[in-house]
Amino acid sequence: MSTAARTAPAQDTTEIEEAGHVDVLIVGAGVSGIGAARHLQDQFPGRTFVILDAQDNRGGTWWTHRYPGVRSDSDLFTYGYRFKPWRGPSIAAGDEILAYLDEVLDENDLRQHIRYQHRVMAASWSTEDRRWSVDVTRADTGQQVRFTTGFLWMCQGYFNHEKPYEPRWEGMDRFAGLIVHPQRWPEDLDVSGKRIVVIGSGATAATLIPAIAGKAEHVTMLQRSPSYWFAPPTTHELAVTLRSLDIPEEWTYEILRRQYIQLTDWLARTAQEAPGDLHTFLIESMRPLLPEGVDIEKHFTPRYRPWQQRIAIVPDGDLFAVLREGKASIVTDTIESFTEHGIKVSSGEEIPADIVVSATGFTMSVLGDVAFTVDGEPVDLTERVTWRGIMISGVPNMAYIFGYFRHSWTLRVDLVSDLVCRLLAHMQDRGATMVVPTLRPQDQDMELRPWCDPENFNPGYVMRSQHILFKQGDREPWTHLLEHEQEREILPKADLEDGTLVYR
Ligand SMILES: Cc1cc2nc3c(=O)[nH]c(=O)nc-3n(C[C@H](O)[C@H](O)[C@H](O)COP(=O)(O)OP(=O)(O)OC[C@H]3O[C@@H](n4cnc5c(N)ncnc54)[C@H](O)[C@@H]3O)c2cc1C
């Protein structure tokens, strides 16, 4: 769906049920929404709030993705929230992450605030009333419901949970086997003895393939081009040492967080300053783990700079192990067509398949595909500019959370939540009921740039969606900085009175 002035679905207002007013309305009960709610409750207590989610359960990404082997691809010491130590292994399975989120919900009594199967369709700001009207469709009853709120906090993630990216290839209709997308993995899918082709070479392929390779007859990873892989040990030595000492869990957590943050800072910096060195390091550390005689240039040497796309983590090199054992193999080629019994690639080879897993990625969803209006005017997001990757120019009383690509997403959830709570407190101190990011006279002519600089980061789902995204400017605070190393200094000190936020 394009964000260009989305129109609110026509509704018969007589059928809309009024659901009441809250101080803050959070959209999304994933890692961001749960973190935002916990910070709000802790830092700005006494506010009423509700969390709406279109799905029937919590967890967002981790509820949607339940394919075999689903796990994090960054360490949990930084993927965990600042306020709650992670006690498990560095890389965690999807259900372990859900269990951690459950603990956060229970320990903070947050479940009572969540309304599932509530999809936000439209949000309309009225300056006169100083409030948003938020129109929701309930998936369980089909009812139209309207909440009102003084502040809208969008924690909707970045991809469409219902519609994954599923390219079409010639001949798909004649394929006699099953085609599945990891976002919609059938719970009862039995892969035993099956020949499986996984299309894709990202984190999903890397986690799924080792999980099914033992059971399936054979798994072929079919990639158009190679990705960068990194194979850290599952057991983190420093974690083992610290946990053997009689020290509070919070200390262990903080030390491990700092170590991982430092490591990721180094990786991100090296990717910019010495990409050739990082490239060599990644290829050479993989080389001894690969099957003997494999064509490394063809199958394992990416055509982009390290970190222009995420580096896929393969703990203990489990993906490489199944390749060495012959349970899985790699084909690097383009798909010509599906046949009745498999996939034909450009070289002429036909790869036999009973099941094709299309690990082809996401369809990006911008701010939950919500149709925004401000005082009756539809908001065309493509004409708007981000304020620090947290608010949108001309859109009052609304913040959003978008995490990091390179560091763990959650590090930004904590930082953005701090800033939003500080902003709410600042508004209260000032006696303001409205805050609008507004270009100052000196910002009016600034150069507008794409939301994400392709030189910096260019995965397929972002590149496919730049045209529906809002923009960034050429100066702070009209930028969306991608590095935690910068933001952890800048955001806590961000000046809320620099003239870019207009209060009323
Ligand atoms: C398999 C996989 C592994 C990943 N591993 C990592 C990792 O290791 N480290 C890392 O940093 N990141 C990782 N990511 C990225 C991951 O998406 C983020 O870390 C994080 O989970 C995003 O959380 P979120 O709450 O912002 O969004 P989501 O998890 O997408 O949750 C958003 C929620 O909002 C709801 N929603 C959206 N629009 C609406 C609407 N209009 N109305 C109502 N509800 C709505 C959705 O239903 C969803 O439940 C991974 C992603 C995937 C797919």
Image (cartoon, grey):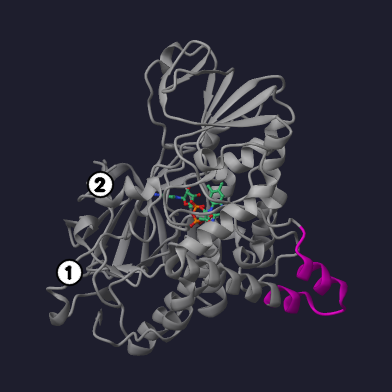
Quick one: SS at disc 1?
Answer: loop
The spot of residue 316 in percent (x, y) is 72, 51
Quick one: SS at disc 2?
Answer: loop
Q: Amino acid at mark 2?
A: Ala
Q: Nearer the viewer, mark 2 or mark 1?
A: 1
Whether 242 is among the magenta residues is: yes
- For label 2, the crowd category at 10 Å Cα-Cα, with few meaning under 14, some 14 to 19 and many 20 or more, is some
Q: Which part of the image, by quadrant, shows the N terminus?
A: top left
Vertical order, 336 against 386 (above or below): above
Q: Quadrant of residue 103?
A: bottom right
Vertical order, 302 against 295 (above or below): below
The spot of residue 331 in percent (x, y) is 53, 30
Query: Depth check: 131 or 93 in front?
Result: 93
Query: Depth check: 495 or 24 in front?
Result: 495
Q: Which part of the image, by quadrant, shows the C terminus?
A: bottom left
363 lies left or right of 317: left
The spot of residue 327 in percent (x, y) is 70, 29
Q: Quadrant of residue 436?
A: bottom left
Please name the residue that numbered disc 2 is placed on.
8
> Who's the residue at 80% across and 79% down the image?
248
Q: Amino acid at mark 1?
A: Glu
Please name the residue that numbered disc 1 is placed on.
447
Tell me the distance, in whole angstroms, between the alpha carbons under discs 2 and 1. 31 Å
Query: Depth check: 448 or 83 in front?
Result: 448
Query: Depth check: 8 or 264 in front?
Result: 264
> Who's the residue at 33% across and 56% down the image?
454
